[in-house]
Amino acid sequence: MRKLAVLLFALSLLGGGEKSVIILVPGFYQLKQGKVLKGTVLAGAFFALGAAALVENQRGYEYYALYEKATNKDDAVFYRERTVKSFRRRNLYILGAALIWTVHILDIRISSGKRAKIRGKIEKNSASLGFSYSF
């Protein structure tokens, strides 16, 4: 429930409604533009990777609980390795979802002309990326 509240708060900061969903959810812009295949692929991949990340996250915590309860060294090592593998997979799924979102943003940028702007700044110890879209 807390995650939903955070999402709704983020939507309200962006102006709420359809405009925010178009930016935040890959595939919605493409579907709105009539690019059904591209929109379906982007949305499907984004949600599938997000769901896989949630599953791996839960699995990792289950393995970690077993690791903490392990009574011998072999079990502890086994469950610790499983925990690390699950969290690595989770991170890869999150990275994949972020890449899908980046493709979505770039597609908006390319197909919408001057309405979308991407700004980036790289400094010695930090980097930032900003995106704006005017409706």
Image (cartoon, rainbow, N blue to C red):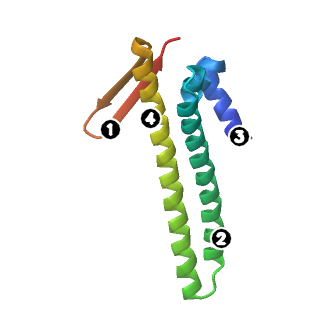
The amino acid sitting under disc 4 is Thr
For label 2, the residue is 65
Residues at marks 2 and 4 touching, judged by CB atoms closer than 8 Å: no
Find the distance from the CA under tag 3 to the CA under tag 2: 23 Å
Q: Is residue 122 left or right of residue 133?
A: left
Classify mark 3: residues with Cα within 10 Å, few (<14), some (14-19) or many (20+). Answer: few
Find the distance from the CA under tag 3 to the CA under tag 1: 29 Å
Picture residue at 40% right of the left edge, 22% below the top: 110
The amino acid sitting under disc 2 is Ala
Q: Earlier in the sequence, mark 3 or mark 1?
A: 3
For label 4, the residue is 102
Q: Residue 126's quadrant in the figure?
A: top left
Picture residue at 53% right of the left edge, 11% below the top: 135
The amino acid sitting under disc 1 is Ser
Q: Earlier in the sequence, mark 3 or mark 2?
A: 3
Find the distance from the CA under tag 2 to the CA under tag 4: 35 Å
Q: Nearer the viewer, mark 4 or mark 3?
A: 4
Classify mark 1: residues with Cα within 10 Å, few (<14), some (14-19) or many (20+). Answer: few
Picture residue at 58% right of the left edge, 29% below the top: 36
For label 1, the residue is 126
User: How far across and down, in percent of the image, does residue 115 sit?
Assistant: 44, 13
Q: Residue 37's quadrant in the figure?
A: top right
Q: Is residue 12 above or below residue 114?
A: below
Find the distance from the CA under tag 4 to the CA under tag 1: 19 Å
Instruction: Name the outermost residue toward the right.
Output: 1
Q: Earlier in the sequence, mark 2 or mark 4?
A: 2
Q: Nearer the viewer, mark 2 or mark 4?
A: 4
Which is more toward the observer, 79 or 106? 106
Residue 2 disc label? 3
